[in-house]
Image (cartoon, helix red, strand yellow):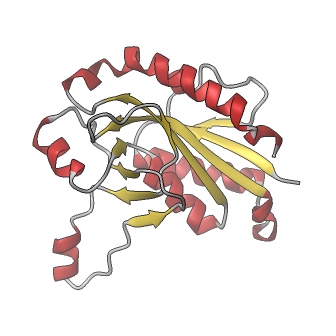
Amino acid sequence: MQKLLVLAAHPLETKYLPDDIDLVLTGVGMSAAAVRATEAVLTRCPDPARRHELTVLNIGSAGALKDGLSGVHEPSRVINRDVDEDLLRTAGFTVDNVIELGGTGPVLATGDSFVAGGAVRDALAARADLVDMEGYAVAVACRHLGVRLRMVKHVSDAADEAALAWDELVEVSARDLGRWFRESGIAGS
């Protein structure tokens, strides 16, 4: 029987999800997300041979790096945007900062800094479509533990100066993510 574990960073993102789901709040940022995702999977499924029975749903808000991108999206790929690939390769390191999720959705860039416009946003827009602060860390934990992952993000803002009002903007994300969850049938699969 398939079990569902829902991971989200912040309680404001989960306001309209059903009360009876298995929900873990990871906290904001990659370190907290990696630790909480790992703890949650190991608590629910300590036996590696049974992890195929668990699906993790990482749900939350994201900033849009491309004009016109809005609504709910399932990323096809997630990257660690904090890695300096060129420098690491020059130093002789193998770079593993991309996780393929499948499908044809947008590329999600994850990092520990909040993106609110400027040169950082412009540089990221050349590499990705969406930006968040937890997705890559959750994906790494799931890949390492052998757990199926599905990622769903709602565009809360344009990753510009207006993103600083995230706590007000996220209400729309929470409502639309709640609707997506109910309509997706994922809880019954």
Which residue extends farthest left?
Answer: 119
Which is nearer the eye, 5 or 118?
118
Q: Is residue 168 visible?
A: yes
Residue 132 shown left or right of residue 116 in the figure: right
Left or right position of 25 against 83: right
| Quadrant hosting residue 115 | top left
Q: Is residue 110 left or right of residue 99?
A: left
Q: Nearer the viewer, residue 54 or 46?
A: 54
Is 78 drawn above or below residue 9 in the view shown?
A: below
Q: Quadrant of the N terminus?
A: bottom right
Q: Residue at x 60, y 41 (%)?
A: 7
The residue positioned 55% from the left and 24% from the top of the image is 176
Q: From the viewer's perspective, is residue 179 above or below residue 100?
A: above
Please state the horizontal and vertical placement of residue 113, each as a whole percent of the image: 27, 41
Is 84 located above or below residue 78 in the figure? Answer: below
Nearest to the observer: residue 110 or residue 126: 126
Q: Is residue 11 visible?
A: no
